[in-house]
Image (cartoon, rainbow, N blue to C red):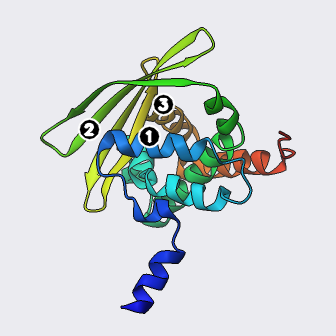
Amino acid sequence: MQILLAVLALLPASALEQPNTAKSVVETIIERVRHLDDKATHSDSAHIIEGLVDFKTLATNALGNRASSASGAQKHEIEELLRKIITKTIYPEAPKFFRDVKIDFTAEENAADLRAHVTSVITKAEKRSTVEYWLAKEASGYRVVDLAIEGERWVENVHDQFDEIIGKKGVAGLIAKMNKRLNELDSKPARKN
C-alpha cells in the first residue's frame, strides 16, 4: 500500500484528475495548451492533450471510403503522421493564442450513441469565433474526434485533401506528401517567445 501511495504522490495532479464529461475534456485540453510553451511541463501537457484526442478515429474518418485502399500498416503510418503534423502545427502557436482569450461554453449535448457535442465561443480582443468539438465516449472517458471553427469541420477539410491526393497518387502518394509536410515542419526554426 505504501508503494502505491508513493507512486501516486509522484504523479502530476492532472494524471489523477481524469476529466469525466465532454466539456471537462475540452477544458482540460485548453488549459494544457495554454502551458505548452513552459519547458518544465511541456511533455506532460502534450501527453495529456494527445491522450484526450482520438487520432486513430480522426485519421480513419479523414480517409473515409479511401480507408479500404490502405493496408493496416499504411493506416497506422497515416495516423502517426497526422498526429505529428497536427501537434507540430498547433503546439508552437497555441499557448500564445489561448493566453488572452475568453471562452464561454454555450452548449453540451450528449447523444444516445455515446457521442457528445460541445460548443464554445472564443473571444480575443473584439473578435468572436464559434468552436465546436465532437467527442466519443470510450471506456477511459471522452476523446475528441472532430472540431469545427466557424462551421468549418476539420475532418471534412482533411478528408477532401486526402481524397484528392489518394485519387491522383494513391495511398503511397498521400504518405509521401504527409512525410514531406512533416519534414517542412521539422526544418522550421523554433519559435521564440
Q: Which residue is at the front of the view, 187 or 66? A: 187
CA gap between label 2 and label 1 equals: 14 Å
Identify whether 59 is placed above or below 51.
above
- The residue identified by callout 3 is 160
Q: Position of residue 26 (x, y in %)?
A: 42, 40
Q: Amino acid at mark 2?
A: Ala
Residue at the spot of label 2: 116
Residue at disc 1, secondary structure: helix
Instruction: Locate residue 1: give its quadrant.
Output: bottom left
The secondary structure type at the circle numbered 2 is strand
In this rendering, would 146 be left or right of 169? left
- View extreme (top): residue: 126
x 56%, y 47%: residue: 32
Which quadrant is home to the C terminus?
A: top right
What's the residue type where badge 1 is placed?
Glu
Residue on which disc 1 sits: 27
Dot 3 alpha-carbon crowd within 10 angstroms: few under 14, some 14 to 19, many 20 or more = few
Q: Nearer the viewer, residue 151 or 28?
A: 28
Task: State the residue at coordinates (44%, 40%).
Answer: 27
Of label 1 and label 3, which has the lower sequence position?
1
Residue at x 40%, y 59% (from the top left corner): 17
